[in-house]
Amino acid sequence: MWWVWLAGILVVLVVLVVILLSIPIALSYEAEWRGRRAKVRLKVLWLFERVGWELPRSAKKEEKPGPERRREPRSRKWGQSGRSALAVLRTRGLFPQVGRFFRDLMHSFEFRDFRLELRAGLDNPYDTGMLFAWAGPASVALYRLAPGRVSIQPVFDGAAFEGASSGVLRLWPVRVVGAVFKLAFSPPAFRVYRVLVSHGRK
């Protein structure tokens, strides 16, 4: 009867994995800028935003010049890999399936609590007016894409660029896994596998 216990343990593990993948992961950000100075704060949230970890700021590293590498001549494998890539691109139904994959992937994300406050202006008031003639419709489109509070104000008494923004990007891992499985086990994917195997034998 050991196999019954093993099957039960596997079922419990699968259920636990599905539950963990069903919990969304969120990334919140807060940004403030004034001229060339900017402050950004990032925080990873989990367990329905009850648990959070603030991401440390990355320090700038000085790049040291390394030794020069010799350019190796291209081998004949480039021609074979190019033919394989062309054969993959010609696979029937591949591009529609990839399009559905990206559409499913976009549904795995949710952007909410978006806020943007911006004050900007140029040296010339006329140029500032022309800039905001374009920025007005853009702010409306931005509000429709990410509903929240959007405030864009012109400054006519000199050059200025200051503001603040915040928001939360939520990711549902179970939807990402589902999109990957739909792509990996779709009929076009199996056609690609056959093409790669046949070209690999040559």
Image (cartoon, helix red, strand yellow):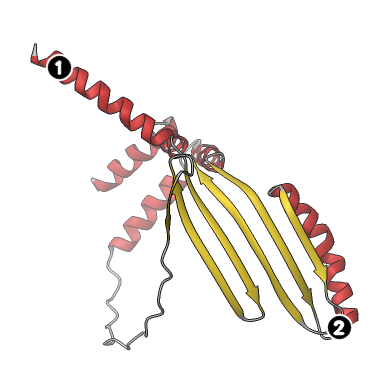
Q: Position of residue 98 (x, y in %)?
A: 50, 41
* Marking on residue 157: 2
Look at the picture and state if 12 lies above or below 4: below
Q: Count the marks: how many?
A: 2
Residue 163 occupies quadrant: bottom right
Q: Residue at x 52, y 40 (%)?
A: 108
Most extreme residue toward the front, as rendered? 50
Q: Is residue 161 above or below residue 86?
A: below
**SS assignment at label 1:** helix
Mark number displayed over residue 5: 1
Residue at x 19%, y 18% (from the top left corner): 7
Location of residue 165 in the rendering, given as x and y in whole percent from the top left corner? 65, 62
Q: Position of residue 136 (x, y in %)?
A: 84, 61
Query: What amino acid does circle 1 point to?
Result: Trp
Q: Position of residue 11 (x, y in %)?
A: 26, 21
Amino acid, disc 2 = Asp
Disc with the residue nearer the chain's start (1 vs 2)? 1
Secondary structure of the residue carrying tag 2 is loop
> How far apart, in angstroms, are the residues tagged by discs 1 and 2?
76 Å
Q: Is residue 148 above or below residue 178?
A: below
Q: Which of the pair 70/39 is nearer the observer?
A: 39
Residue found at x 20% / y 22%: 9
Quadrant of res 186: top left
Q: Quadrant of residue 158?
A: bottom right
Which label was assigned to residue 79? none
Front one among 191 and 31: 31
Q: Nearer the viewer, residue 88 or 95?
A: 95
Please tell me how crowded label 2 is: few (under 14), some (14-19), or many (20+) other residues with Cα within 10 Å: few
Decide: few, some or many residues near mark 1? Use Cα within 10 Å; few <14, some 14-19, many ≥20: few
